[in-house]
Amino acid sequence: MGKTYLGEFEELVLTMVGILGDEGYGNAIVGEILSRMERQVNLSAVHVTLYRLEDKGLVKSEMGGATAKRGGRRKRYFKITNAGLSLLHDLQENRMKLWELLPEVKFSAT
Amino acid sequence: MNTPQPPSWAIRFLEKFCPPSLAESILGDLYEEFEDDLSFCSEAKARRRFVWNVFRFFRPGILLRNHYSYTLFNNNMWSNYFKIAGRNLLKRKMYSTINAVGLSIGIAFCILIFLFIRDEKSFDTFHKNKESIFRVEEKAYDVWEPDPENPYYYSAWLQAGLRNAVLDEIPQVDYATSFSNYGEVAINYKDQVFSENLTFVDQDFFSMFSFSSISGDQNQYLTELHHAVIPESYAQRIFGEEDPLDKIITIVLNGEKKNMTVSGVIEDAPTNSSLDYGILILPSNRSHYVMNLDKWYNFNTPLFIQLQENSGPEEVQAQLSTIVDKYMGESLAKRKLEYNIPDETVMFEYQLTNIEDIHLDTTISWTRSSDPKFTYILGGIALFILIIACINYVSLALTSSAGRSLEVGIRKAIGANRNQLLTQFSVEAIVLALLSLILALALVSVFLPSFNAFTDKNIRIDGMTALFMIGTGLGITMIIGLLSGSYPSLFLSGLNPIKVLKRIGTRVNAGFTKPLVVIQYGLSGILIISSIIMLKQMNFITTRDLGYNQDQVVVVHTNQKFDESANRFIEQFRQKVAPYGEIESVTGTTSSFNNGYSLNGYMIDGEQKSAYVYAVDPYYIPSLNIQLLQGTNFTASDSNALIVNEALVKDMGWENPLEEFLNWREDSLSAGARIIGVVKDYHFLSLEQKIEPMFLTLSSDDTGYLTTMLVRIASDNIPEAMEILRTSWVELAPDKPFDYSFLNEDVARQYEQYDRWTSIMTLSTFFAILISCLGLFGLAGINAVNRTKEIGIRKVMGAEIWNIFMLMNRQFILLVVISFIFAAPLSWWLMTQWLEGFTYSVTIGWDVFVLSCVIGLIVALLTVSYHSIKATRINPADTLKCE
């Protein structure tokens, strides 16, 4: 198996699933992105990304219990897997390494 | 109170495209969003957002997550259906063959009809300017015999001067050409003589119509009076391998020789063109052309015009009526006065018909125009045969369904639903229909030449036609498959599996087959009765005594100059062949039977009368064995004497005709022509018309010269007599073709169309009976098998073979009789319509119906008896020993 790559949006959704813990489902993720990043994203985009992440084995999902809300339809909860967590970890580490290589000069120039 | 709900159609839509495993949570999320939206915006807006969000989910990321596992299962079943269909077809070879033969004949008929309709539709559609090309026609008040319903008659023959008037006075007309077929003329090239068709057109003809040019400069085709353009096949006949361009041919027109230069070669008139042309030359070559230009009462040529692209026929029509006023207003007003016609009546009008509508226009006679009625009749026959074939399938499938019921029971028990069973049986029907299609296509290609001959068409199978055939064939096949498969499959799929598997009521009650057989045999009955009546009528016509002797008479067109010399030529010819014993007599006339006539109108004592007139010579009456009732035949000097027929005597109300005079020239100075004889009525016209008043005269004034020679041959050695005629002809008229026909064949040609219909009816009747009998044969077979045990028991109880035979056949005989009871009035009605076309026709008696019923019964009995006899001969011990 080759190395898994993540797109920016995928990484964002994956992180949010991690943050939300047991409460990660479609709408909650949209809401979380809105409140933390002030970024309006579409539900369908989030769903599609979640399924893709699930295909890659980075998240796993299960159906929750029925509620009176939502027209009686169950939620599909997403949880981050170990693979997902370590991928996030790796990404963070790599980014830090590269960050340190940035020359200070650039900052003073701005 | 309802809480606001998102649109349900959007939900259903999402459920359609979304994988079921994801749908619930996605819908839940959408619903949650909808409820959130409700808290801060209107319901309508929330619903809009919901729909929008649903559509946002319609994206590959979701759609491609569908796994079609469900349909995969179905595909397995499909292959099973095909396999079972194939096995069943092979298992019951006889029924499959019966069905396939019947269906393929039906499909073949349908394909032929579709080809026919396609060809009819394609008439004149190949012209690039077809939208703006129109035929000009006259609509004129019939002053002579006005029919109170519609006192107008319509014709495409117009005045020679109209072309110039239209071109000069109507700016919307771009082009105009006359188009007038002259008929055959003699053509000389080097020392050869040909007889070819001649057509008069103007140079505009080539700009208007899209007939492709083979050689020569299209813009210079008819720019000179002596130019001639010839069709390709004519060029091959006349010039062979030579290049025809700039060659000089001699055309003999009304006895006058004209040298013409070939300025071009164009394609032969396509078979689907209403314009059927021969050698094309300018109308100014016609005799009296210039004189006729301002004779607005002389109608002698059809006219076609092409309008400017943006102008419609309505504007032009208005301008045409000013032309009527300008050139004909005066004479029309005079006519109105003369015949006391009410002032408001429109006497004369021009009308326009688009070129594409000419072919199926029945109000105006035109070469190659056809009556859409024929298409309907052909279509009706094809439909009859197709229905009969479909019924075969349905009734055979139903009657043999007992054998399939177990299969249905098991399929249902292991979970087949009704739809799947429906699909299965439809697949079986369609597989059979597809097999028949292959057979049908083969039949079509075999029968196409004879179909072409019958319909007078030239349909060939090229790439497009083949595609079209396969396309329509597939279409018909699918419809047949679904139609004939639907009833058996509905019936079979409705069986109760428990009953079937427990063997309760295994004998399927398919009572519906009986009405089907009645329909089938009823349709065949209609065809049988109709064709018997048609055959009787044809026999009646061809054997009827016409009042003259039409056998062994040769008709020769003399092609002489149209003056006294034409009459002299016949005299010369008579003397030339007089020494030969093989030639009995030679006589001349203005027109032979079935070859034109001349109808003369005249006023006598203020009454309008009309009579047919033939100029003849004194040899006419004896030569044709016409019976002279009173008076004497002409002598050579009787130039002002008439011989009339009985109908004319009756029309005039003469007591003693030999003392009467007929002033048919309306000569105010004399009493008219003396009547010297009365002939017994003979059929100088077709039998479609009754015998009208007619007279014969020796005078060529007002009647024309003798253009046709009738030669009676004495000996039975026709080739020898023909050789004498030919050699005499070549000596007397070496530059004219020796064109001849036989009188009895000419007369028979009048009924060619009826003859064709009779043959197509007989052929379709044959096929209809064949297919119905195949079906009956199959039904009887199944019936015999179903009743094997019953027959066994009856035999054991002492039934005679004859009793069992009766028992087996009784019901079929009854069905056939019932169907004939339905068929008789229907076909009586149809045939009365058909016979109305004839003045002299057979009467439809009860004998026809009895005869056809007996034929139907005998055929049915023969078919059914095979199985009955087989069933009665089985040893009861064989059938009863099991169980």
Image (spheres, rainbow, N blue to C red):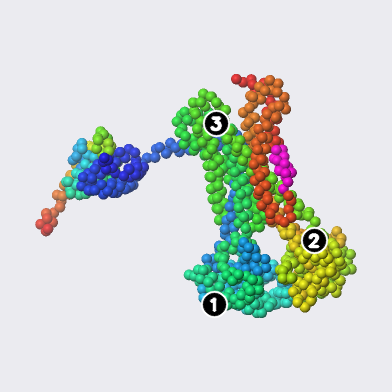
Q: Chain of mark 3?
A: B
Circle 2: element type: loop
Please name the amino acid that badge 3 sits on.
Arg
- Report whether residue B77 is seen: no
As drawn, the label of residue B681 is: 2
Circle 3: element type: helix
Report the magenta stretch's main SS: helix
Mark sitting earlier along the chain (2/1) = 1
**Callout 3 environment at 10 Å: few (<14), some (14 to 19), or many (20+)?**
few
Please name the amino acid that badge 2 sits on.
Asp
Screen quadrant of the N terminus of chain B: top left
Which is closer to the viewer, label 2 or label 1? 2
Indicate yes or no whether the magenta region holds residue B18: no
Which is closer to the viewer, label 3 or label 1? 1
Q: CA distance from mark 3 to mark 1?
A: 80 Å
Q: Are marks 3 and 2 on the same chain?
A: yes
Give residue B762's position: percent from left, percent from top: 69, 48
Circle 1: element type: helix
Q: Look at mark 3 in the image and give the residue it sits on.
A: B404
To which quarter of the image does residue B254 belong?
A: bottom right
As drawn, the label of residue B169 is: 1
To which quarter of the image does residue B721 belong?
A: bottom right
Q: Is residue B508 above or below residue A38?
A: above
Q: Are marks 3 and 1 on the same chain?
A: yes
